[in-house]
Image: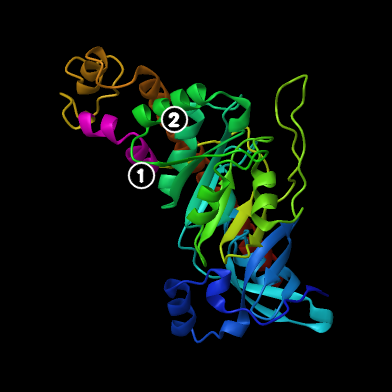
Amino acid sequence: MVLSKTERDMEPDELGMNPGIRDYLDSHGLSIRETGRVTAEHKERYLVRTITGEFEAEITGHLRYKAESREDFPAVGDWVVISSYDEGLAFIHEVIPRYSIIKRQAVGRHGDIQVIASNIDYAFIVQAADRDFNINRLERYLTICHASRVIPVIILSKTDLISATDLESIVESIRNRIPDIHILPFSNESLEGFESIKTFIEKGKTYCLLGSSGVGKSTLVNNLTGNEVMKTGQISHSTQKGRHITSHRELTILANGGIIIDNPGMREVGITDNSEGLEITFDKILALATACKFKDCTHTQETGCRVLDAIEKGEIDWNAYQNYLKMEREKSHFELTLAEKRQKDKAFGKMFKDYKKNFLQDRFKK
């Protein structure tokens, strides 16, 4: 059934439609009224918002058959081609090509990718300044953002729980390691710095919240909407870790026209085949690597390594270097695992094809 109806028809740009999506629709003879944007996902049942309302939807058997992996299924933020049937139920026929996609290694499934959100313009990387701050994890988030061609913005929450001096020290440590990035400190309690975030959000642009549980992502969404649209929770006193309150991804359209996607907290941010992301995040290291004596230098022990030379001279932060090596190893392992998985899938497909062929031949011989 139709789950909600807007008070008025919405314009496509209010849902975040950009010229690239419009061009795709025009070139494929698709009408705006045949499309919508996925606002939530619940175990392969979706909510899709169109210019006239919001519908519950599921994918067609054809789309399921064509999908080579979970990455090809709809995700929150996707534009999709739909048709509606009795009682307002919609069917998703096609996922319109994404202009950006934030993804990570699927937790517990080697060689698989989990789509976090798609068609994102900015990623708000939220860390609590009082306990959650970890610059190595920031670089992980930056890497998946850069690989996705999404502009990252660092949000430091819970600044009311630390002193101004401590906050200044945290901001300085980020600047020293990650120059040229927006940093927006704020407090959900006192709302200090909240206006800076509010004015940063533009009409028709899509923003994705990334971060661990308990850092204040859902409370930020509630403050931005002025309503209790997302459940929130307290930090566990025994573990000092956030409880998982947001259980699914959800897209919300703000009063000022901005579009924000909240996500469940992520304790693992596994790197996939993010070569471009690593090159941007650790651009200083990669630039120096071009001057190494050997083209296949691993930057760990080789004579004539410009990266190791820069570390000895204090030109590169030792912790940033260690974080780079860790993520490079993780990326290489993922690529190897993915290649092995594809090879096994290909072999299984050939075996199944041969079985069908032999089965039919034997049957018709009889």
Q: Residue at x 44, y 52 (%)?
A: 150
The one nearer the camera, 329 or 173, is 173
In percent of width and height, residue 35 lies at: 60, 78
Per the picture, the main secondary structure of the magenta-coloured stretch is helix
In percent of width and height, residue 215 lies at: 64, 35
Position of the C terminus, as image quadrant, is bottom right
Mark 2, residue position = 171
Q: Residue at x 77, y 26 (%)?
A: 236
Q: Is residue 143 positioned above or below 248 on the image?
A: above
Q: Is residue 110 positioned above or below 292 on the image?
A: below
In percent of width and height, residue 81 lies at: 61, 76
Graded by Cα atoms within 10 Å as few (under 14), some (14 to 19) or many (20 or more), the crowding at tag 1 reads some
- Under mark 2, the amino acid is Val
CB contact under 8 Å: marks 1 and 2: no
Left or right of residue 185: residue 231: right
The one nearer the camera, 322 or 163, is 163
Left or right of residue 231: residue 101: left
Q: Which residues are magenta?
A: 275-288
- 1 vs 2, front mark: 2
- Under mark 1, the amino acid is Glu
Q: Quadrant of residue 158?
A: top right
Mark 1, residue position = 276
Question: For numbered disc 2, what is the local secondary structure?
Answer: helix
The one nearer the camera, 211 or 274, is 211
Graded by Cα atoms within 10 Å as few (under 14), some (14 to 19) or many (20 or more), the crowding at tag 2 reads some
User: How was this image coloured?
Assistant: rainbow
Q: Is residue 350 visible?
A: no
Q: Which mark is residue 103?
A: none
The one nearer the camera, 245 or 279, is 245
